Amino acid sequence: MPKVITIDPGRSKCGLVLAEISAKKIYKAIILKSELLENYVRNLTAAEDVTKIIIGNGTSSREIKEKLYFFKKEIIFFEEKNTTYRAKARYFELFPISGLKFLIPREFFILNKNLDAISALIILEDYYKIKFFLNKNIDFKTWLK
């Protein structure tokens, strides 16, 4: 099945999501250093049937597109305003608090989390206007150095 990559670009790090639109499933969700993005996407597109890349139109989005010159299919810029702020709320939808953890302020759970992959998910969901489901064993806190 064809898949889509969504990127939340940044100067030092990027969030990246690989999803299948028809199944509404997320297969990869990572955060990686910006200098690793080109090789990671090159390897991912060689292994997967990726038909489109959606890039958030914020920080360093033009530079990111230039790095993806090898991708000869569709590359789209899409609005990413407030995605980092919205990622905090989406985090708790994906990873609900249960048990006695309800007594601890929610901010404690995301204090040191990198939310760039969730921001990439929000860009994807906004673009397609649907909610996506996580494939088993997805960890949005992954960091590739």
Image (spheres, helix red, strand yellow):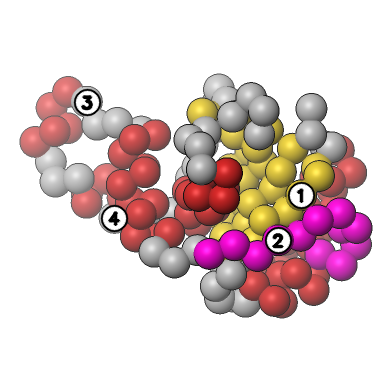
The three-letter amino acid code for the residue at tag 1 is Lys
Residue on which the image places disc 4: 111
Tag 3 or tag 4, which sits nearer the N-term? Answer: 3
Residue depicted at x 44% and y 54%: 115
**Part of the protein shown in magenta:** 68-79
Residue 91 point in image, percent of width and height: 36, 43
Residue depicted at x 50% and y 49%: 126
Q: From the image, state whether disc 3 or disc 1 is nearer to you.
A: 1
Residue on which the image places disc 2: 76
Residue 35 point in image, percent of width and height: 71, 69
Disc 1/disc 4 C-alpha distance (Å): 33 Å
Q: Residues within 10 Å of mark 1 (few under 14, many from 20)?
A: some
* Image disc number at residue 31: none
User: Could you tell me if residue 40 is visible in this image?
Assistant: no
The three-letter amino acid code for the residue at tag 2 is Ile
The three-letter amino acid code for the residue at tag 3 is Ser
Tag 2 or tag 3, which sits nearer the N-term? Answer: 2
Residue on which the image places disc 3: 98
Tag 1 or tag 3, which sits nearer the N-term? Answer: 1
User: Could you tell me if residue 123 is visible in this image?
Assistant: yes
Q: From the image, state whether disc 1 or disc 4 is nearer to you.
A: 1
Q: Is residue 132 above or below residue 91?
A: above
- SS under mark 4: loop
Instruction: Give the farthest residue toward the left.
Output: 103
Tag 2 or tag 1, which sits nearer the N-term? Answer: 1
Q: Residues within 10 Å of mark 3 (few under 14, many from 20)?
A: few
Q: Is residue 145 above or below residue 4?
A: below
Residue depicted at x 80% and y 73%: 66
Q: Residues within 10 Å of mark 2 (few under 14, many from 20)?
A: few
Residue on which the image places disc 1: 52
- SS under mark 3: loop
